Amino acid sequence: MKILVSLIAFAISCFFSSSEYSDLTFLDKRIYHMGKIASYDTTFLKTIRFTNNSTEDLEILKVYKSCSCTDVKLSSKCLKPNEVGYVEITVNPLNSIGLQEITVHLIANTEINDHVIRILFEVE
């Protein structure tokens, strides 16, 4: 009986405890249409700024990209409250044809942890 009471008390304390999350806010758009790109163009770069709008440190835990033709660089994996960071996305569309969509996922210590950036372009 004591174990059951202890488990119930623990469950209630977990339910009502406040977990602090960081808040990643993009300062630039997260969806870009770059238009038509010539097939002989080698690369293009897009820089997207974001900020930490919380009282907790923001940590980028992982970065996923949808294509090996994409290189992703972060200004920092950790931002203090109110700091601004950026992600540089370089795309090499060589050997592509037609409408293309590149996605970059920033996984962070935020309540909704997956932050997606989309870049669309058409290779002629």
Image (spheres, grey):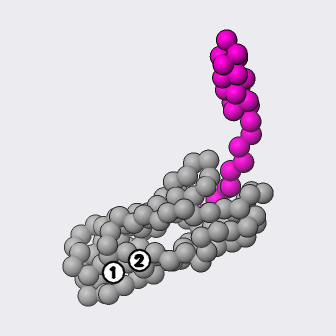
Name the residue rendered at 41%, 82% in the picture: 44
Residue type, mark 1 in image: Asn
Residue placed at 32% from the left, 87% from the top?
42
Quick check: 83 left or right of 64? Answer: right
The single residue placed furthest to the front in the displayed view is: 2
Say which label, 1 or 2, has the lower sequence index: 2
Is 122 colored magenta in this rendering? no
32 horizontally vs 124: left or right: right
Q: Which residues are magenta?
A: 1-27
Q: Amino acid at mark 2?
A: Asp
The image quadrant where one finds the C terminus is bottom left
Q: Position of residue 38 (x, y in %)?
A: 28, 83
Label 1 to label 2, Cα distance in Å? 9 Å
Q: Nearer the viewer, residue 35 or 102?
A: 102
Disc 1 + disc 2, Cβ < 8 Å: yes
Q: Residue furthest right?
A: 55
Image-based side of 54 in relation to 41, left or right: right
**Mark on residue 92?**
1
Q: What residue did someone put label 2 on?
A: 71
Image spot of residue 66 (x, y percent): 35, 64
Task: Say if 14 sits above or below 41 in the image.
Answer: above
Task: Specify whether residue 37 is in view.
Answer: no
Q: Count neighbours of disc 2 (C-alpha within 10 A) and say few if under 14, some if 14 to 19, many if 20 or more.
A: some
